[in-house]
Image (cartoon, helix red, strand yellow):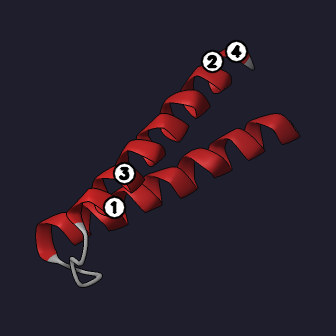
Amino acid sequence: METEKLLCFGAMGAAGLVALVFLLDIVAQVLGGQSMLLDIMFILGAVFVLWQGFETSRELR
């Protein structure tokens, strides 16, 4: 597999993990649930990176 695809999929995996952790923080207060606004901002950022990774992976085909 090409290096560009590996980097793209790695970034998408990391963003998915971040979105999952902060979604769990909103639902179950896994990290203490201190700031819901911060959780939402992290989730939005992770979703943006996932979207960009998906679009980039489509271009690399």
Q: Name the residue furthest bottom.
A: 32
Q: Residues within 10 Å of mark 3 (few under 14, many from 20)?
A: few
The reply to whether discs 1 and 3 touch (Cβ–Cβ < 8 Å) is yes
Residue receiving disc 2: 58
Residue ranking furthest to the right: 3
Circle 4 — which element? helix
Tell me the residue that label 3 is attached to: 41
- Pick whichever, 38 or 60, lies toward us: 38
Mark 1 → mark 2, Cα distance in angstroms: 30 Å
In the rendering, which numbered label is found on residue 51?
none
Q: Which residue is the extreme one toward the left?
A: 27
Spatial separation of the CA atoms under disc 4 and disc 1? 32 Å
Q: Quadrant of residue 29?
A: bottom left
Is residue 61 visible in the rendered structure shown here? no
Which residue has dot 1 on it? 38
**Nearest to N terminus: mark 2 or mark 3:** 3
- Residue at the image position 70 percent from the left and 15 percent from the top: 59
Q: Which residue is mark 4?
A: 59
Would you identify the image quadrant in which residue 8 lies?
top right
Distance from the alpha carbon under mark 2 to that under mark 3: 26 Å
Q: Residue 32 is drawn in which quadrant? A: bottom left
- Secondary structure beneath dot 2 equals helix
The disc labelled 3 sits on which kind of residue? Answer: Met
For residue 40, above or below residue 33:
above
Image x and y of residue 60, in percent = 75, 20
Q: Do the residues bearing badges 2 and 4 touch, measured as CB atoms within 8 Å?
A: yes
